[in-house]
């Protein structure tokens, strides 16, 4: 039986929040690696250094696949298990592909992951550890569309799957009841996690108790934060590497911006100078997290300096990726090579060799 649950057993991992997911799945289809229930840690000294009276860290970086994407891909792969034997595809800057490979392998799902050749070595190394097909391409999204159209692969991208935000409602559920919440900050690419967290608070808290929601991007940023930076000009902040392989455009952007504004929050962009300063500060306080986590803390420091968030209640930093992702080293010549495809024909040949079948042959 796929997954780690038995029929009639108590739900494991994030499935304790199943009533929030707006989808019904039999217990035998619920895949779990122990995601969810991540620690909420007070960080008083670091908060004092950032100018935040009550800082708490939601440690999604301690998730079993190294990022908060474990929640989303655990749910989406469980839906595929329940629906039957359908292979899947994802294009990703790294974290989502790693999570997809982990849960697809657990559920016996055949998966194609399309990633940029510039994906950091640590993420490619993790992908090599799963029995799935990972293909490097400078055209990952275009080839994904071909795989969906010609091979009928299920699209696991959080930016297009309408159920993707639902799993992140569990983060909100785990924050409710921990005390007064002033604000939640998190790095976002497609915005699925921010949208899901907001939906969770909307379901669980009355309007007067809902925290502000703040989304963070690297500089120059994308659609999620554009309204807050339209008048600053393109050269207002140096460009950083952060998020450069992630989504710049997302169909979720309008909904995310509406939720952020309705909460009283805003979007933030973080440049290389802010990242460097926060990394040094975090190291001094014994915190190691990803570049995305550091960007989240940098945005919180800027918000605190501008006195833009209520001081009554905790400020929550959702740390979305683990410290290994600080390593941006590209693959080396001695790494086991991954297949490369830049055309539909090249991808077709790789899929056939890996045992994928076209829909008319299934």
Image (cartoon, helix red, strand yellow):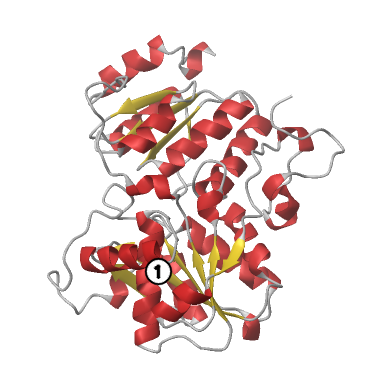
Quadrant placement of the C terminus: top right
Q: Is residue 37 above or below residue 329?
A: below
Q: Secondary structure at mark 1?
A: helix
Q: Is residue 58 above or below residue 260?
A: above
At 69% from the left edge and 27% from the top edge, which residue is drawn?
2
Horizontal side of 175 relative to 239 (left or right) equals right
Residue 37 screen position, x and y as percent: 66, 54
Residue 130, visible in the rendered structure: yes
Identify the residue under disc 1: 297
Towards the viewer: 280 or 357: 280
For the view shown, which residue lies furthest in the left direction? 235
Towards the viewer: 178 or 203: 178
Horizontal side of 201 relative to 293 (left or right) equals right
Which image quadrant for residue 284? bottom left
Q: Is residue 93 above or below residue 262?
A: above
The 10 Å Cα crowd at callout 1, few under 14, some 14 to 19, many 20 or more, is: many
């Amino acid at each position: 039986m796929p997954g780690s649950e038995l029929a009639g057993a108590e739900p494991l991992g994030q499935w304790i929040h199943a009533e929030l997911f707006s989808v019904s799945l039999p217990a035998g289809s619920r895949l779990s690696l122990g995601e969810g229930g991540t620690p909420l840690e007070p960080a008083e000294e670091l908060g004092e250094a950032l100018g935040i009276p009550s800082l708490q860290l939601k440690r999604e970086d301690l998730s079993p696949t190294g990022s908060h994407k474990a929640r989303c891909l655990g749910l989406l792969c469980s839906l595929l298990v329940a629906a039957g034997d359908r292979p899947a595809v994802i294009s990703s800057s790294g974290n989502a592909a790693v999570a997809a490979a982990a849960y697809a392998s657990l559920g016996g799902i055949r998966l194609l992951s399309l990633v940029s050749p510039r994906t950091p070595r640590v993420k490619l190394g993790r992908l090599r550890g799963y029995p799935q097909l990972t293909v490097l391409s400078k055209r990952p999204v275009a080839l994904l569309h071909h795989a969906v159209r010609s091979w009928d692969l299920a699209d696991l991208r959080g930016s297009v799957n309408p159920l993707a935000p639902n799993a992140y409602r569990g983060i909100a559920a785990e924050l409710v009841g921990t005390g007064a919440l002033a604000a939640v900050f998190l790095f976002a690419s497609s915005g699925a996690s921010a949208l899901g967290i907001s939906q969770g608070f909307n379901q669980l808290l009355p309007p007067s108790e809902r925290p502000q929601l703040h989304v963070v991007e690297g500089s120059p940023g994308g659609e999620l934060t554009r309204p807050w930076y339209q008048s600053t000009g393109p050269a207002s902040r140096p460009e950083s590497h952060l998020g450069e392989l992630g989504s710049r455009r997302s169909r979720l952007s309008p909904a995310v911006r509406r939720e952020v504004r309705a909460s009283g929050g805003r979007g933030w962009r973080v440049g290389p100078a802010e990242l460097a300063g926060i990394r040094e500060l975090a190291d001094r306080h014994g915190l190691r997290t990803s570049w995305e986590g550091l960007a989240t803390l940098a945005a919180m420091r800027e918000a605190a300096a501008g006195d833009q968030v209520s001081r009554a209640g905790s400020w929550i930093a959702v740390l979305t990726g683990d410290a290994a992702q600080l390593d941006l080293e590209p693959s080396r010549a001695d790494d086991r090579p991954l297949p490369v495809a830049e055309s539909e024909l090249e991808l077709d040949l790789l899929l056939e060799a890996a045992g994928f079948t076209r829909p008319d042959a299934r």
